[in-house]
Image (cartoon, rainbow, N blue to C red):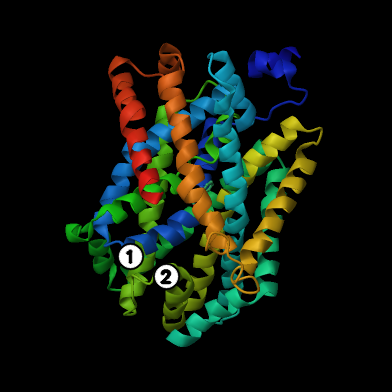
Amino acid sequence: MAAIETTHGALAMDATKVHDHWSSRLGFIIAAVGSAVGLGNIWKFPYMVGQSGGAAFVLVYLGCIALIGLPIIIAEWLIGRRGQKNPVNTMAELAKKNGRGRGWMLVGAGGTLAAFLILSFYSVIGGWALSYLAEAGAGSFSGIGKDAAAALFSGLLASPARLLAWHSVFMLLTVGVVAMGVSGGLERATKLLMPALGVILLGMVGYGMTTGSFGAAVDYLFTPDWSKLDSTVVLAALGHAFFTLSLGMGVMIAYGSYLGQDINLVRAAGTVAVADTTIALCAGLAIFPIVFANGLDPASGPGLVFVTLPLAFGKIAGGLVLGVLFFALLIFAALTSSISLLEPVVELLEERTPMGRVASTVVAGVATWALGVAALLSFNAWSEVLIFGQNIFDLLDKLTSKFLLPACGLGAIVFVAWFLDREGVRQDLGLGRAGFSVWNVLARYVAPAGVIAVFWHSL
Ligand code: PHE
């Protein structure tokens, strides 16, 4: 018990199981970057830039990351580190200690629910990436035309069996990693996958430079066309800032719960935000040169990666290798995020039921997988099944991104900024007077106002 007390403090006394920890500061940062960098960066960010007028969107997005994303990620880690438990118990205990109502527990519960719901359809998209890796390796893109590329993607969506198979493989990989624990699974996997992702991405940016269209891609990403900026674009940028930093879903609270006092949360948040943004921009610099060099449409939306790129890979020399590398990159990004989405649910089960790590992971994984099956059927057999006018896949996406994430992110930042002891928070953040004043303005007013704006718009 003595050993446990020194690392976990008095909180460990009532926990029957020993709470895992990140093995090092670097391990935590890499795992957090792995969570942040996902399909959102490689798949969604480039197509959103494409649809929203290029650099104007990018600049607004950067502002949202700095002014709203950063304070919230810090708040979530702070909560998690203080609680050293799953998001639900953590919020309940912190609220109690600070003389606040039990209702704050909902921030943890809503976030954990959001993680569960998001993973169910995130894993379906991860399955698409696996399927496309197989297609790329089999040479299916070679010489492919526009219609055939579109048909390849719609063919996948129309096939419950193939979607199911790939979704299952993706969930199996996710469960396999998470079952091995925080330091032995999540941290170890991200330490392997993130460097590989970085190398492939840089290689692809290097390839982009040889296409003759790199300049066009740079212009596209960095020369703003302000006429395209309207409230929809601003709100899309804000919503994406939330999603890409993995906020409002218990993930960062859970990751914070495995932290010790030795890490500077502000600096770590800066590192994660910069890395996440850099990787999203690099994804743009990898994808758009290929798109432009082949005379393709940068604004093709969600199909950018699954239709437009295969078309390009089919045309260019070395397209097979490039295609395999690209979809491997997409899978690595997706996996290091999916494991983080499963973690809050597993942590909750592990701490609140008699089940151990492995059983908790399997139960959480099977439940997520089952919901994912409903999500994947909405592309084919169940496409007519509408709830509130939405198919199941879209409903899961909308319910989380438009409702649960902003609500829980807002709850986290408001709780830390307004309801925790100020001096304690200042010390937790390791900030001096000036720094703390900046924090206060951002955390108390700017970030909540931004989130409320998104909320308002989406309702
Ligand atoms: N941040 C990840 C991405 O950009 C998605 C994600 C969301 C991961 C929530 C974990 C939690 O794709």
Q: Which residue is mark 1?
A: 50
Q: Nearer the viewer, residue 59 or 216?
A: 59
Measuring from the top left, give residue 340's x and y in whole percent: 59, 44
Amino acid type at circle 2 is Leu
Measuring from the top left, give residue 84's x and y in whole percent: 62, 25
Is there CB contact under 8 Å for labels 1 and 2?
Answer: yes
Q: Secondary structure at mark 2?
A: helix
**Residue 246 appears in the figure:** no
Indicate the quadrant where residue 129 lies: bottom right
Indicate the quadrant where residue 210 lies: bottom left
Measuring from the top left, give residue 50's x and y in whole percent: 33, 65
Callout 1 crowding tier (Cα within 10 Å): few <14, some 14–19, many ≥20: many
Horizontal arrangement in the rendering, residue 23 relative to residue 172 (left or right): left
Residue in the image at 20% along x and 59% along y = 223
In the depicted structure, whether residue 98 falls above or below residue 413: above
In the depicted structure, whether residue 19 falls above or below residue 194: above
Residue in the image at 39% along x and 46% along y = 241
Measuring from the top left, give residue 101's x and y in whole percent: 55, 20
Q: Nearer the viewer, residue 257 or 291?
A: 257
In the picture as drawn, the residue positioned furthest to the front comes out as 388
Q: Secondary structure at mark 1?
A: helix
In the depicted structure, whether residue 226 falls above or below residue 251: below
In the picture as drawn, the residue positioned furthest to the right comes out as 354
**Residue 92 appears in the figure:** yes
Q: Which residue is mark 2?
A: 304
Amino acid type at circle 1 is Gly
Earlier in the chain: of badge 1 and badge 2, it is 1
Q: How many marks?
A: 2
